[in-house]
Amino acid sequence: MILKATLFASWVSATSAFSPVVSFNAQRTSLRHTNAKTPAPITTALYATIANSTDLLSPNYVSSKDRAASETTVAAVPKMAQRWRKSTKQLATLGPASESKEMIEKLFLAGADVFRLNFSHGSQEQKKELLIMIREIEEKYSHPIGILGDLQGPKLRVGEFSDPDGVYLDAGQTFRLDLDESRGDKTRVMLPHPEIIVASEVGHVLLVDDGKIKLTVTGKGEGYLECLVANEGKISNRKGVNTPDSVLDISPLTPKDRSDLEYMLGIGVDWVALSFVQRKEDIEEMHQLIDKWLPEGSFKPAVMAKIEKPSCFIGNSLEEIVELCDGIMVARGDLGVECAPEDVPLLQKEIIDECRKQGKPVVVATQMLESMIDSPTPTRAEASDVATAIYDGADAIMLSAESAAGKYPEESVAMQQRIINRVEGDKHYRNMLSGNQPSPDNTPTDAIITAAKQISDTIRAKAIVCFSLRGSTVLRAAKGRPGVPILAISPFKETARQLSLSWGVYPELPQTGSYFSNIVEEELFDYDNSISEEATDDFNLVLRNACRAALKKGLVSDPDDLIVVTAGIPFGTPGAANVIRVVPAAGPACWDGQCRID
């Protein structure tokens, strides 16, 4: 009994800084410390008793009197455990079909790891309300949820026609685009974007209305383009224009985007997605604005570039853009308009490979389960498309209208998770990931992470645990696509939320709050409420945290389960990883079924 109580006290105290506040006052009076030096065995039954004593995944702590009725414990939380058993992450766009707290919670439980707020639609205040609801759900389940704010970007459109129904263009006819503000007809229409006229050359192609009308430039003059209509079709007011052959001298941030960006920084989104990225300078402009407008003491959001323009593939542009970003989105909507359909799958693979090479998370988006807007099941082609993105090695897959405006938002998220689970259980998936391993950098951190991966494979560890301030060590681990979950522990909630997008990462939600840049070593691991003796050194506390968090996440289920822990000493050094340790789930004082109680 003394052994049981002491071990229980050790586990309870192990993560007071990283887990929800749970009262154990009732047990305090029965806990006694022992000075015994003889190793004592720990049994599976004892481990189960410890696990079942702390209900950390349940939204509310269940008293011992009510526990028999609830039967929800750290070691047995079927719905949440099933939700976590995946490596590829899911983004769900919120909209009219999913703007209630009840539906957002359903989407989260169905598998959504990150929620996208599309600033192209709705008011800023509405987005704040959604963010607040997401944070409440996050707190309820003590699980970090990422929030992505997506900027609209420039919208290039033709002017209006005299006939409100538009006009019908014949193949082979000439059609002029100019700066004349008068209403258009069958021969011409206003193009209120002089930058397109300046950038276009003879032979360049312009696509109107998502490519339904193809125009080839045959001549240009001061303020106009003379074009040849390649295919017949109808053109009407304010239809969009794509310029696949031109790099436009415009900012990707419109006045609306700048207002939305400043608002995002104020409410605290975790990721900001930039549309209409053409070159690396667009990302540099984004970082400059964030640094300028970020409220004092706030955590800088991660920047995601949406790759949707062919210019991103000129020379080494893609490599430069990925290097400057924290993540990438394969925006196949506009990319599919401006590029040949047969090129899009190859470009998708190229983007994913570059992101994996640089260790940046990559999201595949647009029309993944399009038919589920109106149907409870997807087409087989859509299921294959989702599976292909997973096989390619994407960190995450996204739903747009399916979850925002469709009839079956919950079913769409659940279907994505079903496909993820099926693919990740396929031996070919593991073989494909193993056969496409990026080379590690020549740094101590990469050496530690590579060793951790090899050790976990050799000893069949249940998880790799990474302690990280800003997530860089965790991203290096995810880059190698290990065969076990990556448990990420950080003192920053913001870091945990950003990591929720990365492949294979199970982020732990800290309860200590954010320290931003003023971190002191003592604040990283706060054990004021400890009910056992203090550990002899900080690293022992780190190891206890690792075991505790692995138990809470359901990654270990037996006291002899092994985990591989990486950390950086001295603590508080961003990017440092110089220590590796193999620890049994029972704790750092145990090994091979024997525990030493000091």
Image: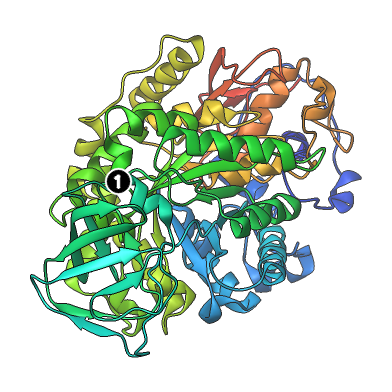
Instruction: Give the left or right position of residue 21, taking residue 250 as reference.
Output: right
Which residue is the extreme one toward the front?
222
Asked if residue 47 can be seen in this view, the reply is no
- Up-down relation of residue 597 to residue 569 (above or below): below
| Residue closer to the observer: 74 or 329 | 329
Rendered view: 190 above or below 45: below
Residue at left offset 48%, top offset 74% = 404
* Residue 98 vertical placement versus 469 (above, below): below
| Dot 1 amino acid type | Ser
Of residues 432 and 188, the one nearer the viewer is 188
Q: Position of residue 143 (x, y in %)?
A: 63, 53
For the point 54% across and 61% down, which residue is it? 115
Rendering coords of residue 201 (x, y %):
24, 46
- At horizontal 54% and vertical 47% (from top left) the residue drawn is 500
Residue 228 lies, with reference to residue 473, above or below; the image says below
Which residue is at the front of the view, 73 or 323?
Answer: 323
Q: Residue furthest left?
A: 172
Question: Could you tell me if residue 358 is visible in this image?
Answer: yes
- Mark 1 nearby-residue class (10 Å; few <14, some 14–19, many ≥20): many
**In this image, 100 relative to 560: left or right?**
right
Residue 508 found in image quarter:
top right
Q: Quadrant of the C terminus?
A: top right
